[in-house]
Amino acid sequence: MNRDMSMLSLVLNASWVVQLVMLLLVVVSIASWAAIFRKLFALKRIQSLNEVFEREFWSGTSLNDLFAAAAQNAKLSGPMERIFASGMREYQKLRERRISDPGTLMDGARRAMRASFQREMDVAEANLSFLASVGSVSPYVGLFGTVWGIMHAFIGLAALTQVTLATVAPGIAEALVATAIGLFAAIPAVVAYNRFAHDIDRIAIKLETFIEEFSNILQRNLGAHTANSPTSSASGH
């Protein structure tokens, strides 16, 4: 068999349908890797900003000072800081309306924080569905290219009076390249999806824990009746 069996030759000699499938899978793979790197950096930034704010929250800084800093740096703040700011904002609005019922104040603050939490999780989960689709669909797209290529190869062999392994192998190899590219696109997407889903679950648990801890602090401030707005520090709680 003198035919060139290099990867480039197999791609160039494949039928146009198989080449189209390969091109589609390559484009999807590139888009998948771009989404993976964007999500990787985004989640690392979220985790870093949450850790910075959590240290500041428990360092002894007053809640009013934290709220003022969060309002000034709204565009650069992390999810935990934005959730804190939404709860404080609603709490203070209700206090300004002369609402003194503890249940009403706490329900309003919690609702505001839960709504902010849902918005933050929607942002954190962006592009995960794309990675899931790539991981589940790419192998089947590659398999379609393989089936089509094998069918095309056997149709071409039908006109031959003598068929040997040397005549069958190139067509089969060209078709199998599509499956290989499909797996190349799918495997990283599946691994990344599982990793990101785990990281996002951990972030969600951490944010929900913070909401409960901050709610307890607000509840204690309400019980103390020391001021019209919470001014006690977070340390020691």
Image (tube, rainbow, N blue to C red):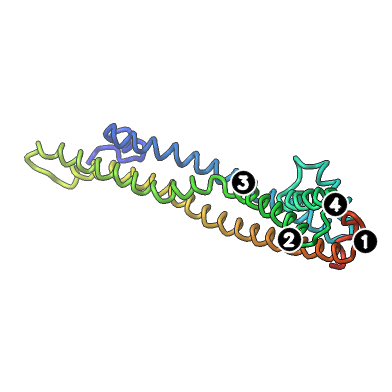
Distance (Cα) linking label 1 and label 2: 23 Å
- Residue assigned mark 3: 123
Residue type at the position of mark 4: Arg
Q: Residue 128 or 26: which is nearer the viewer? A: 128
Of badges 2 and 4, the one in the foreground is 4
- Residue assigned mark 1: 226
**Where residue 133 sits: x, y (%)?**
44, 47
- Residue assigned mark 2: 210
Of badges 1 and 2, the one in the foreground is 1
Instruction: Tell me: residue 233, above or below residue 43.
Output: below
Q: Residue furthest left?
A: 161
Specify few, some or many for label 2: CA neighbours under 10 Å numbering under 14, 14-19, or 20 or more.
some
Of badges 4 and 1, the one in the foreground is 4
Q: Earlier in the sequence, mark 2 or mark 4?
A: 4
The quadrant of the rendering that contains the C terminus is bottom right
Distance (Cα) linking label 2 and label 3: 18 Å
